[in-house]
Amino acid sequence: MSLPNILGILLLLGGAALLYFGLQASQSAGEQIFESFAGRFTDSTTWYLIGGFAAAVTGLILLVTR
């Protein structure tokens, strides 16, 4: 297995973990209250979601390309 494949797997798993924690955080009571007043998620939850999506997509690209 080559280095890009290993890095792709790690990025995909790390991105999936970040997305999971971001989605869990977005469903918390405090986050729901903040969203109802501010109309958006908190900065930390937003960064979890953005970072998780970016890492997962990058990992998937590394796995698919040769």
Image (cartoon, rainbow, N blue to C red):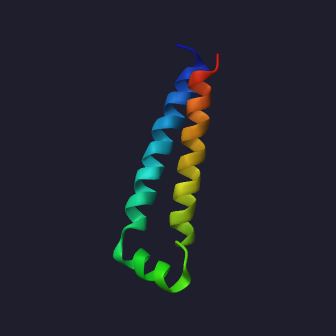
Instruction: Name, please, the residue furthest toward the top.
Output: 1
Q: How many marks?
A: 0
Say which quarter of the image contains residue 63. top right
Give the side of residue 9 with respect to residue 4, left or right. left
Q: Position of residue 19 (x, y in %)?
A: 46, 51
Question: Taking 35 as reference, is 26 above or below it?
Answer: above
Question: Taking 14 as reference, is 59 above or below it?
Answer: above
Q: Position of residue 66 (x, y in %)?
A: 64, 16
Instruction: Name, please, the residue furthest toward the right.
Output: 66
> Residue at point 58% right, 55% down?
50
Q: Position of residue 44 (x, y in %)?
A: 53, 66
Give the side of residue 66 with respect to residue 13, left or right. right
> Residue at point 37% right, 60% down?
24
> Residue at point 60% right, 45% down?
54
Say which quarter of the image contains residue 27. bottom left
Instruction: Name, please, the residue furthest toward the left.
Output: 29
> Residue at point 52% right, 72% down?
41
Question: Taking 41 as reference, is 61 above or below it?
Answer: above
